[in-house]
């Protein structure tokens, strides 16, 4: 078992400046999971049970849950897309392969708008208990589906919640991933040495995330989301005067895309855009900038070994 790094940048972050000498890099992440949630109707072993309320249907197709998730591509995504486009903000779509295979128009629209399409697994599921062969297949299927829908393979990966101990090694072995977001431990990217290859980790965040509208997470009104994200923005913006900082904003089409919540996203974006020295960037752009700032060679994909599909 590898040693845990609890020190991080305690002795000081690298003296890296973001493009344009920005003080803060802001990464907006739109999670595309709808259609990839576990469903007996899709031949999965069980139904997804987490939504606005936690309700488990066992042994039968859960048409109620399917309808809840369908709100995202039908109504939520158009609102989020419009909010980003009106402000010229480019985001990263964190897409499950099965979801984007069913909603290829989302990938096409995202690419047309200049967004990045990264990988969020094949199904919306944890990898922690997968054996190696199963995990290899899941990664390969996600890459293939996103490549077909977006016209290019994903450069980033983020497993739902817990990874397996080998997930990052498999991503690096696959050769097509610039970064992963399977960490929650910092406000900055960092490099890990995996299979002797410098690999970028872009930590994600569950607090500046619309998931907190669910399950007593603390957000009730759209203004709750805006206020919390603005507070995080202001702290990191102030710290960015002396050292690089990154802020991740997590979104879900079925959550923030609701009529009473979308205004919270718009209020946050307007606040952040009014400040000078803020770089709204895709996660791939942030990963490349971090590598460049550290003096690492420009990243290029490596040949894909047997066992993976590119």
Image: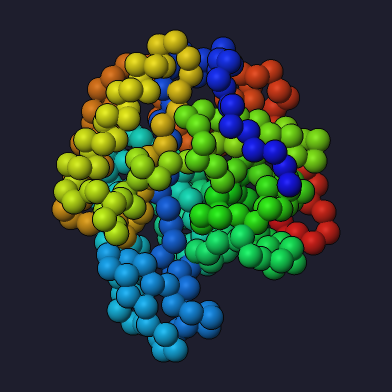
Q: Is residue 276 left or right of residue 241?
A: left
The colour scheme used to paint the residues is: rainbow
Q: Quadrant of residue 133?
A: bottom right
Instruction: Work out which residue is located at the far right of the displayed protein and give it.
Output: 306
Residue depicted at 65% across the width and 19% down the height: 294
Q: Position of residue 305 (x, y in %)?
A: 82, 54
Please name whichever residue, 69 or 192, is drawn nearer the observer in this view of the structure. Answer: 192
Quarter of the rendering occupied by the C terminus: bottom right
Q: Position of residue 309 (x, y in %)?
A: 73, 60
Residue depicted at 24% across the width and 42% down the height: 225
Q: Is residue 309 left or right of residue 105?
A: right
Q: Is residue 269 left or right of residue 294?
A: left
Please name whichever residue, 218 or 233, is drawn nearer the observer in this view of the structure. Answer: 218
Q: Is residue 307 visible?
A: yes
Please name whichever residue, 59 or 247, is drawn nearer the observer in this view of the structure. Answer: 59
| Image height of 185 relative to 163, above or below | above
Residue depicted at 57% across the width and 22% down the height: 9
Residue depicted at 58% across the width and 15% down the height: 11
| Image height of 104 relative to 183, above or below | below
Q: Position of residue 73 (x, y in %)?
A: 35, 63
The total number of labels drawn is: 0
Q: Is residue 141 visible?
A: no
Q: Position of residue 60 (x, y in %)?
A: 41, 89
């Amino acid at each position: 078992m590898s040693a845990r790094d609890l020190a991080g940048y305690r002795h000081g972050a690298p003296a890296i400046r973001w493009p344009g000498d920005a003080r803060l890099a802001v990464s907006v992440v739109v999670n595309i999971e709808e259609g990839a949630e576990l469903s007996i109707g899709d031949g999965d072993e069980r139904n997804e049970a987490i939504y606005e309320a936690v309700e488990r249907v066992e042994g039968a197709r859960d048409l109620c849950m399917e309808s809840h998730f369908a709100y995202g591509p039908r109504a939520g995504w158009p609102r989020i897309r419009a909010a980003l486009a009106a402000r010229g903000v480019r985001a990263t779509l964190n897409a499950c392969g099965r979801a984007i295979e069913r909603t290829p128009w989302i990938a096409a629209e995202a690419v047309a708008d200049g967004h990045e399409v990264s990988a969020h697994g094949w199904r919306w599921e944890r990898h922690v208990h997968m054996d190696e062969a199963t995990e290899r297949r899941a990664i390969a299927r996600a890459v293939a589906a996103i490549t077909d829908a977006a016209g290019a393979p994903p450069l980033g990966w983020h497993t739902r919640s817990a990874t397996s101990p080998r997930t990052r090694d498999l991503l690096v072995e696959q050769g097509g991933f610039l970064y992963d977001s399977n960490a929650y431990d910092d406000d900055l990217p960092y490099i890990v040495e995996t299979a002797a290859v410098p690999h970028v980790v872009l930590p994600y965040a569950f607090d500046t995330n619309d998931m907190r509208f669910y399950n007593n997470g603390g957000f009730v009104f759209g203004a709750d989301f805006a206020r919390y994200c603005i507070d995080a923005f202001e702290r990191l913006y102030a710290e960015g005067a002396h050292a690089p900082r990154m802020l991740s904003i997590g979104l879900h089409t079925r959550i923030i895309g609701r009529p009473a919540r979308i205004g919270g996203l718009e209020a946050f974006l307007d606040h952040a855009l009014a400040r000078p020295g803020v770089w709204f960037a895709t996660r791939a752009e942030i990963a490349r900038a971090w590598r460049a700032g550290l003096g690492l060679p420009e990243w290029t994909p490596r040949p894909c070994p047997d066992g993976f599909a590119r």
